Image: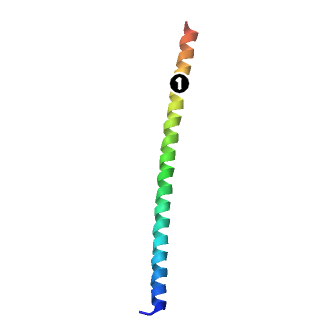
Amino acid sequence: MGIADQFKDKAQELADQGKQKAGQAKDQAKERGRQDRDQRSDSSSGMQDRAQDAADQARERFDR
């Protein structure tokens, strides 16, 4: 095996590693996006619950 072949092999190896890391980064970004959406959904549900509680309390005070 000549030096040129060694460089080609090393270049291919590095290219493969780059593709693998790019795929992993893409997967991690998707997961972070899912977690962010879930968190926003949970927090908006909590806000809706608090708003509903406040409205209920206001109605109770008004009815007295």
Residue depicted at x 53% and y 12%? 60
**Rendered position, 54 above or below 30:** above
Q: Name the spot of residue 13 as percent of width and height, x first.
A: 45, 78
Residue that numbered label 1 is attached to: 52
Q: Is residue 32 above or below residue 61?
A: below
Which quadrant: the C terminus?
top right
- Which secondary structure lies at badge 1? helix
Q: Nearer the viewer, residue 33 or 25?
A: 25
Q: Closest to the observer: 17 or 58?
A: 17
Horizontal and vertical percent position of residue 9:
45, 84
Rendered residue at 49%/76% (across/down)? 15
Q: Quadrant of the N terminus?
A: bottom left
Q: Amino acid at mark 1?
A: Gln
Across and down, in percent, residue 20 comes to: 45, 68
Q: Residue furthest top?
A: 64
Q: Residue sitting at 50 percent across and 40 percent down?
A: 41
Q: Nearer the viewer, residue 45 or 21?
A: 21
Mark 1 Cα within 10 Å, few/some/many (few <14, many 20+)?
few
Q: Position of residue 54 (x, y in %)?
A: 55, 21
Q: Decide which of 37, 4 is in the foreground and name it.
A: 4
Q: Residue furthest front?
A: 3
User: In the figure, 10 relative to 4: above or below?
Assistant: above
Which residue is the extreme one toward the left? Answer: 1
Q: How many marks?
A: 1
Looking at the image, the residue that sits furthest to the bottom is 2
The colour scheme is rainbow
